[in-house]
Image: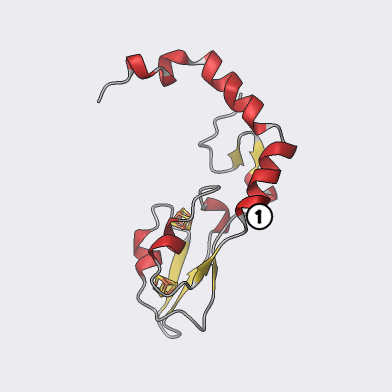
Amino acid sequence: MSDPKNNNQWHGIPRQEIEWHPTIIAERCIGCGLCVTSCGRNVYAFDYEANKPVVVAPSMCMVGCTTCATICTRDAVEFPSTGYIRQFIREHKIQRQSKDMLKSAPEKYDVKLREV
Ligand code: SF4
Ligand code: SF4
């Protein structure tokens, strides 16, 4: 089974086939850069002349996450709807695959074995 953390794939699906990445609404953006400096996946660069973030690596964005949209105080970051990604999960039977992952690797996921 493929590694779901591989950025080229998400649960075995080529990442480029999944339309999940931020879009900047330039009219609302004040150029604070918080989205750029907070993203742990280097999805953004910053255009210093335009004073705006630029989405330079959309396929590096973590599928389903919306952190940069949550922390943008100007509501200037948008993502596809949750309906889109949930439908995608159903169509590609990703929940079944997740169940199989749990069954096949209790040494990795079992709460009793988890060190804190
Ligand atoms: S966090 Fe929002 S306002 Fe700040 S640079 Fe990013 S999009 Fe613009
Ligand atoms: S959702 Fe997360 S990974 Fe994706 S661009 Fe925003 S901060 Fe980066």
Residue at mark 1: C-beta within 8 A of ligand 2: no
Measuring from the top left, give residue 9's x and y in whole percent.
61, 40
Q: Depth check: 53 or 109 in front?
A: 109
Q: Quadrant of the N terminus?
A: top right
Question: Residue furthest toward the left?
Answer: 116
Where 103 sits versus 37, above or below? Answer: above
Circle 1 residue:
19
Determine the residue positioned at 42% across, 61% down. 70
Tag 1: Cα neighbours inside 10 Å, few (<14), some, or many (≥20)? some
Question: Which residue appears at 40% of the width and 68% of the height?
Answer: 72
Rendered location of residue 101, percent (x, y)? 56, 21
Q: In percent of the image, x 52 and y 53: which residue is there?
A: 61
User: Is 49 left, or right, of 20 in this rendering?
Assistant: left
Residue 112 at x, y percent in the picture: 34, 14
Which quadrant is the C terminus positioned in?
top left
Name the residue nearer the viewer: 41 or 91: 91
Q: Nearer the viewer, residue 3 or 111?
A: 111
Q: Is residue 1 above or below residue 104?
A: below
Q: Is residue 113 left or right of residue 54?
A: left
Query: Please, is residue 105 above or below residue 3 in the view?
Result: above
Q: Secondary structure at mark 1?
A: loop
